[in-house]
Amino acid sequence: QVQLVESGGGLVQPGGSLRLSCAASGSFFSIATMGWYRQAPGKQRELVATINSDGTNNYADSVKGRLTISRDNAKNTVYLQMNSLKPEDTAVYYCKAYVFGSRGFGDFWGQGTQVTVSS
């Protein structure tokens, strides 16, 4: 089993910054892709950014230039540096990992962390 634990959410004013972290633990061989998704009230969960084990990444158009994803493979941890935050960035942010374990590949999700951008 794989556990993902997110941290770093909170309340920030527009234009401010936050850094989210997500650490994976448990029994697995490797993590292929890690990513961040978000879900605002009344909306579907959407992709924010993903990063592969080789560092290649992908971003939603709405966050390009403001949010930066990175990962530390040695720590099985993914980060999301969030700058120039806007009220529309308010959502619960979820970490996801595509993991290779004894039963093959599978997706695992964290419990989510709330980010609120408001003055």
Image (spheres, helix red, strand yellow):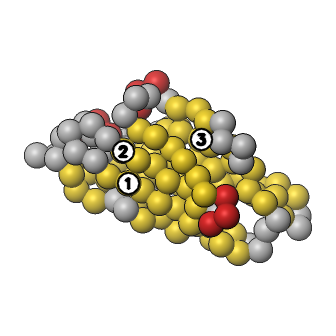
- The residue nearer to you, when weighing 91 against 63, is 63
Horizontal and vertical percent position of residue 3:
63, 70
Contact? badges 2 and 3 (CB < 8 Å): no
Contact? badges 1 and 2 (CB < 8 Å): yes
Note whether residue 96 is visible. no
- The residue shown at (77%, 74%) is 27
**Mark 2 secondary-structure assignment:** strand
15 relative to 91 in the view: left or right: left
Label 2: which residue? 82
Question: Is 71 drawn above or below residue 6 in the view shown?
Answer: above
Question: Is 74 drawn above or below residue 14 in the view shown?
Answer: below
Answer few, some or many: residues within 10 Å of disc 3's Cα (few below 14, many 20 plus, some between 14 and 19): many
82 relative to 117 in the view: left or right: right
Answer few, some or many: residues within 10 Å of disc 2's Cα (few below 14, many 20 plus, some between 14 and 19): many
Residue 19 image label: 1
- The residue shown at (66%, 42%) is 55
Label 3: which residue? 50
Kind of residue indicated by mark 1: Arg
Contact? badges 1 and 3 (CB < 8 Å): no
- State which tag comes first along the sequence, 1 or 2: 1
- The residue shown at (88%, 67%) is 102
- The residue nearer to you, when weighing 74 against 93, is 74
**Mark 3 secondary-structure assignment:** strand
48 relative to 30 in the view: left or right: left
